[in-house]
Image (cartoon, rainbow, N blue to C red):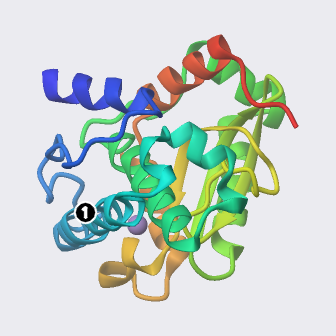
Amino acid sequence: MLTVLITLLSLLQINAISTTLAPLPYAYNALEPSIDAKTMEVHYTKHYQAYLNNFIKAVSGTPSDTLTMEQLFAKADKLPAVVRNNAGGYWNHKLYFAQLSPTPAQAPSGALAQAIDAKWGSLQNFREDFNRIANSHFGSGWVWLIVRNHTLEITSTMNQDNPLMSNAEMRGVPILGLDVWEHAYYLKYQNKRSDYVTAFWKVLDWDVVEKLYEQAAEQGVPVE
Ligand code: MN3
């Protein structure tokens, strides 16, 4: 429980950059059968780790070395591709792994549930919209639920970009992020991305999404 809490707290500090990955707060096989153990292990220990390693290598000794994640993302359009891709890769995966759980809250409650109902009418309608965007996203990227101008929006980004970046089509604070890179699902689902997207909802912990929503609502959000 403490590990989960620490992970969550560090997740909420978007400026925090650590040089090592915290251990995953659940076992690689804990999300079976929704997400298989091999995918989790390779995704966490190879892909996520590589983004962090390559990010540190790319910024070492450069002016970017002293910037926070937030500052880096704010000038993402001016960064070398290697910095932007790996900074995004690190941050996006931090969110991804922290929002998954073997014992997830299956639905939002409180203010987040109200905001989803206000925008989409129901959680099911929201999921249908989100799934449509996730299933039709061309190539590698991410699909997000963001807070923008005090409202919720669904958006997607290419590669390892995210909605905090200056170049994002729709900027806002991500409170839920779905990795639709093939490395996130191919071992188990092959070309059937929609089966992975369906399975994702079974292991998404809405408590985490809700905490991020509350924080985003408190702090205010970037406005175009
Ligand atoms: Mn990934």
Query: Is 39 or 158 nearer to us in this picture?
Result: 158
Looking at the image, residue 171 lies above or below residue 49: above
Q: Is mark 1 within 8 Å of ligand 1?
A: no
Q: Residue at x 25, y 63 (%)?
A: 49
Give the residue at x 58% y 69%: 80
Q: Residue at x 63, y 50 (%)?
A: 144
Query: Residue 143 falls in which quadrant of the image?
Result: bottom right
Q: Which quadrant contains ligand 1?
A: bottom left
> Residue 45 occupies which quadrant of the picture?
bottom left
Where residue 64 sits in the image (x, y, percent)?
50, 51
Residue 98: where, in percent of width, then height?
34, 41
At horizontal 53% and vertical 50% (from top left) the residue drawn is: 177
Q: In this view, does 168 lie to the left or right of 15?
A: right
Is residue 126 among what the camera can see? yes
Residue 1 appears anywhere in the view: no
- Pick the quarter of the image with the C terminus: top right
Looking at the picture, which amino acid does disc 1 mark?
Answer: Gln
Secondary structure of residue under mark 1 = helix
- Placement of 23 over or under 161, stated as above or below: above
Residue 175 x %, y %: 57, 36
Percent x, y for residue 3?
Answer: 15, 28
Mark 1 highlights which residue? 49
The quadrant in which the N terminus is found is top left
Image vertical order of residue 83 relative to residue 9, above or below:
below
Side (left or right) of 70 relative to 5 = right
